Image (spheres, rainbow, N blue to C red):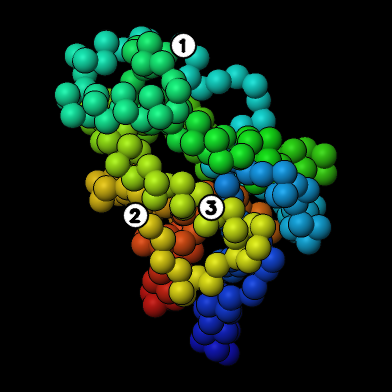
Amino acid sequence: MALFQRLKNFFHTLTARRYSWPALDITLPGDRYLHLVGSIHMGTHGMSPLPDKLLQKLREADALIVEADIAGSDSPFDGLAPAEPLDQRLSPALLADLEKTLRALSLSRDEFEQHYAWHIALILQATQAQRLGLRPEYGIDYQLIRAAAEAGVTVMELEGTTSQLDILRQLPDEGNELLQDTLTHWHENARLLQVMLSWWLKKPPAEDALVLPTTFSQPLHDVLMHQRNQAWCEQLYALAPGRYVVAAGALHLYGEGNLPALLRQRIAFQQTVQ
């Protein structure tokens, strides 16, 4: 009977219930139920309000789990020491690529002269999203945090803004590779944003038939995606019994080394040792 129940629980985790938003359900041993939501940090007006059924799941949850609680007004970038001039830190080729993109966006190089490369990459990515009509107030995680506050649901963090900033600050060469990838894959990133928007505005993806454009080099993918997914997997597996809505960046839920796959592997491993 115990073996049958374990098998039943395991195969239940593989059952993919479809929602009108990008999401996956994972049942962990010990009465832990996760509703994993593929969040987009900036969105459009059409992504608000959130689906009623998603909000109902949130109201019934013991907690909302997000990458970082971004409801506050303080910027994590406040207080960063100024960097050296760009021509002392970037290769001539990278600097030329950056200047080309800044001209295309009608931005002045002077605005970025003392920013670290990883910070410039984030600003350019946010600028690109804004030019495509996306706004932070329509981001999925931001809307869920606001809804949790209204419903009195506890908000928990997987990382927090300080930890996220630490990851960026520890990138080799001040994040030159992240800046290079941002510039090299500029058009692919725009297409990826449009794809993820369509998951909320039109139809969520089928997990087993998803092919995404590449916008990170393999070393960056390992640091920014896979290693974080592994850490989140351990955190989620250590949760107390209960129901949780987990809002993680959509790219963490799909593609190579994704969070749901790691959780399922963790479940399967525990089943084999029991």
Q: Looking at numbered disc 1 in the image, what kind of residue is underneath it?
A: Gly
Image x and y of residue 91, in percent: 17, 25
Badge 2: how crowded within 10 Å, few (<14), some, or many (20+)? few
Q: Residue at x 55, y 67 (%)?
A: 205
In the rendered image, the vertical position of residue 221 relative to residue 272, given as above or below: above
Q: Nearer the viewer, residue 46 or 40?
A: 46
In the rendered image, the vertical position of residue 215 relative to residue 13, given as above or below: above
Which numbered tag is attached to residue 214?
Answer: 2
Instruction: Look at the numbered disc 1 and give the secondary structure of its residue.
Output: loop
Mark-to-mark CA distance, 3 and 1: 33 Å
Image x and y of residue 186, in percent: 38, 42
Q: Quadrant of the N terminus?
A: bottom right
In the rendered image, the vertical position of residue 120 relative to residue 78, given as above or below: below
Q: Looking at numbered disc 2 in the image, what kind of residue is underneath it?
A: Thr
Q: Nearer the viewer, mark 1 or mark 2?
A: 2
Q: Quadrant of residue 164?
A: top left
Task: Locate residue 237 relative to residue 101 in the image: left or right.
Answer: right
Badge 1: how crowded within 10 Å, few (<14), some, or many (20+)? few
Q: Do residues under tags 1 and 2 come within 8 Å of each other at their CB atoms?
A: no
Q: Which residue is mark 1?
A: 79
Mark-to-mark CA distance, 1 and 2: 33 Å
Q: Nearer the viewer, residue 118 or 196?
A: 196
Task: Locate residue 171 relative to residue 198 in the image: left or right.
Answer: left
Q: Which residue is mark 3?
A: 194
Q: Residue at x 51, y 22 (%)?
A: 76
